[in-house]
Image (cartoon, rainbow, N blue to C red):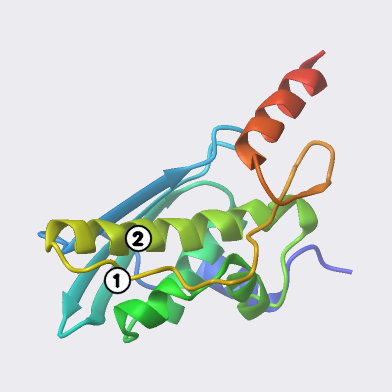
Amino acid sequence: MPIYSEKVMDHFRNPRNVGIIENADGIGEVGNPVCGDMMTFYIKVKDNILEDIKFQTFGCGAAIAVSSMVSEMAKGKTIEEAMKITNNDVAKELQGLPKNKLHCSNLGADALHKAIENYIEKNKISSVKNNNDEKQECRCPYCNITLRSDCELHIKKCKEEHKK
């Protein structure tokens, strides 16, 4: 059984919307200190619609595929609709990710949300809520358990334990 779905491989081999938007309306950057993945999203907004979206990702194939998929999912959506994109939505659109790579989907959605929050802050727009009622989860790549809170702290401690 292949580790990655065909959709993940397609987005890794042929990522969509790679690059930088000069004079972006919003920029969001996130990283994972454990695996070293870094994602930066750039957005252009016109009439409350994400007119353009680009990303730069430093990381594994799953991180690149996630960034590509998030950019496709968000482009053309309203700010409110894009804020509703969840980590689980991204993983589902990619037809699944290995358990030890689910954290990549967290980074993609989080980077998009940070870019939108940056746009809102810069333009002094009344707050647009991230209406995700579902609890966000992450999976520790070291002990393979699902976490509902304190993900970064747990992963940092687990990394130290696994070095011993």
Q: What residue is at 59 percent from the left and 54 percent from the top?
A: 104
Q: Are marks 1 and 2 in contact (CB under 8 Å)?
A: yes
Image: 91 above or below 19 = below
Side of 112 relative to 3 (left or right) = left
Q: What crowding class fits label 2: few (fewer than 14 Cα within 10 Å), some (14-19), or many (20 or more)? A: many
| Image coordinates for residue 34, horizontal then vertical, percent | 61, 33
- The answer to whether residue 150 is visible is yes
Quadrant housing the N terminus: bottom right
Using the rendered view, name the quadrant where residue 48 is placed. Answer: bottom left
Q: Name the residue under label 2.
A: 55
Residue found at the very far front of the displayed protein: 126
Side of 71 relative to 22 (left or right) = right
Find the distance from the CA under tag 1 to the CA under tag 2: 7 Å
Q: Nearer the viewer, residue 117 or 142?
A: 117
The amino acid type found where label 1 is placed reads Ile
Side of 18 relative to 96 (left or right) = left
Q: Mark 1 points at which residue?
A: 53
